[in-house]
Amino acid sequence: MVEIKPYNRYVESLSGRTFLDIARSIGIPIRAECGGIGICGKCKVIVEGRGELSPPTPNEIKILGDKGISQGYRLACQVKLLSGEFRVTIPPESVFQRYRSADIGYERSIPLEPAIRKIFISAPIPSLEDPKPDIDRILERIDSGLDNIEIPIDVIRKIPEVARVAKWNITIALWNNEKVIDVEPGDTSKRMYGIAIDIGTSKIVLHLVDLVSGETIAIESMPNPQISFGADIISRVTYALKDRENLVKLQNLVVQGINSLIDRVISRAGVQRENIYEAVVVGNTVMHHLFLGVEIRYLAIAPYVPISMRGLRLRARDIGLKINENGVVYTFPNIAGYVGGDAVADAIAVELNKCEEPCLLIDIGTNTEILLNTGREIYACSTPAGPAFEGATMRFGMRAASGAIDQVFIYFDNDSRDYIVRYNVIDNVKPIGICGSGYIDIVANLYRLDIIDRRGRFNRDIDSKRIVLDDEEGPRFIVAWSSETGIGRDIAVYGKDINELILAKAAIASGIEIILRRAGIDAEDLSKIFIAGSFGSYINIENAIAIGLIPKVDTNKIVFVGNTAISGAKLALKSIKIRREAEELTRKVKYIELSIDPLFRKIFTENLSLP
């Protein structure tokens, strides 16, 4: 038996499973950014008790060290509880927490022209003098030219009873003038809703939209439930490829998550799910495939071919979404294997496709998507920045959740003759780690103060209590003393962390540089740089420029637009013209595959230093 602290949960059967598997099975959230393969070290737990444990694995010895293991620390994804009685404590820094991100983004006004249309009709009751069939009676009162309209069999079965109970005062719900979605008694033409869904690698955001007024009437979000199988898309792809059942499990998780968000928005807004007739879904290409439950193997290997570049129209019931039984799901078109519908939605939201002067769009994340409109042509590429900006590869790294240090300023104090660190912590609690925006600030400050050089190496000529250079843990700068933290240990940035950040910024900077070169554009020629996504909403732009993450331009040209993926999805929900724009954009884009670009390795190497 195992007792799990601080949750006071008990599990009787151990069955030789890893503790991570045990925790997952009962819904306890443990961080596992690497997907549970033992390389990120974020799932540290303390194991006490009597019984048989699996011996420490090489990964545990490497990450925890002999000292950590002797203190009872193990990695949840590696340790197996074989028999006996144990108490396992999950420390605060190992608990997965709801994190800060943008649920909304820049949104422009457009004329309403949704695919869904509802028409109220009042028809004469059939008689011996007028025995016209029910469907003909309906179609002649909707519109001319709809003779070939599709009517699902369950709607056909409803018509006779609904029409007669309502004395032929009924409302018809149509999708794109092609398909009858539903027939409803009375005048329900004002009850017409749709949902926009952004399936992010880390988070799912859902907006409920009134398609009569165009207003957003409820917003809900949640961490992507797939996250326990890996923080980044590569971890999830690896998991999905192990077994077909794993792919099914990931698909079920995301659909169940979306359905729980649907339950929350309809409860909040007082809307019936039967009156939600359409869902527009955006996400990167991997999330797109996992949402559909489509084989992901051929997306994961060269030449990285997705199932479709086109926007897809599917039946909600076939996916498992709990909206109207005949509701439609529209998935945004993709550009390439690693530039998905979320990037297309970003571009549509900020009207990148209509820029007359050079405009750059950057959606910073584990897989950073970059789009450039020169005013004549549109280019796109993606660059694997890795999970450094989300803290996965850093010693004290974490997402932007409660307890994360997210803003930092460092200066030299002449009175104490040492460095003073001022920091902000999300939710104003004791810090338990550092998130991506905090790491950018720290590295920029350390570089400005000459504490590190261009390669990120510590200056050995500086004497400071905060700088530790010669011990087994490795060189580091202490950001928060143990007395200040919520974990009882110093929180520091290590030389390895700085190297990881430089690698990530080099990947993004190289992608930007190559896309500009291929288009024949200099950074100073850009009229606008749009920074999209949750991460971009919280970074200090001067510090991002200082470390070389963003091109050195007039900061007035840089616009933070938030979660424009959800904004683009809502635009497409409200207007079929926007969908045509999105489809046209994907056909026009010139995609640059960085992995085979001859310049990438050279430019990447050049960017492996601070400016």
Image (cartoon, grey):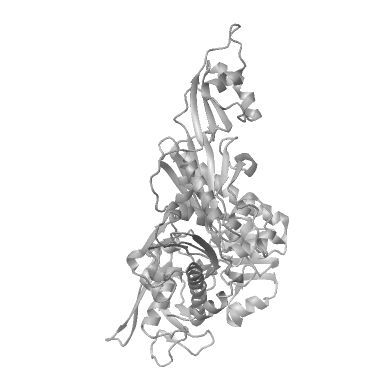
Q: In this figure, what is the number of numbered marks?
A: 0
Residue 105 place in picture, x, y as percent: 41, 53
Residue 46 visible in image: no
Question: Above or below — where is 589 with respect to 482?
Answer: above
Residue occupying the point 27% across, 86% down: 415
Is 528 displayed left or right of 474 in the figure?
Answer: left
User: Which of the pair 575/221 is nearer the observer?
Assistant: 575
548 to 370, vertically: above or below: below
The C terminus - image quarter: bottom left
Where residue 176 sits: x, y (%)? 54, 35
Residue at point 49% right, 40% down?
194
Above/below status of 88 relative to 175: below
Residue 71 can be seen, yes or no: yes
In the rendered image, the residue lying farthest to the bottom is: 461
- The answer to whether 273 appears left or right of 359 in the picture is right
Furthest residue toward left: 415
- The structure residue drawn at horizontal position 64% and vertical position 29%, both measured from the top left corner, is 154
Which residue extends farthest top? Answer: 129
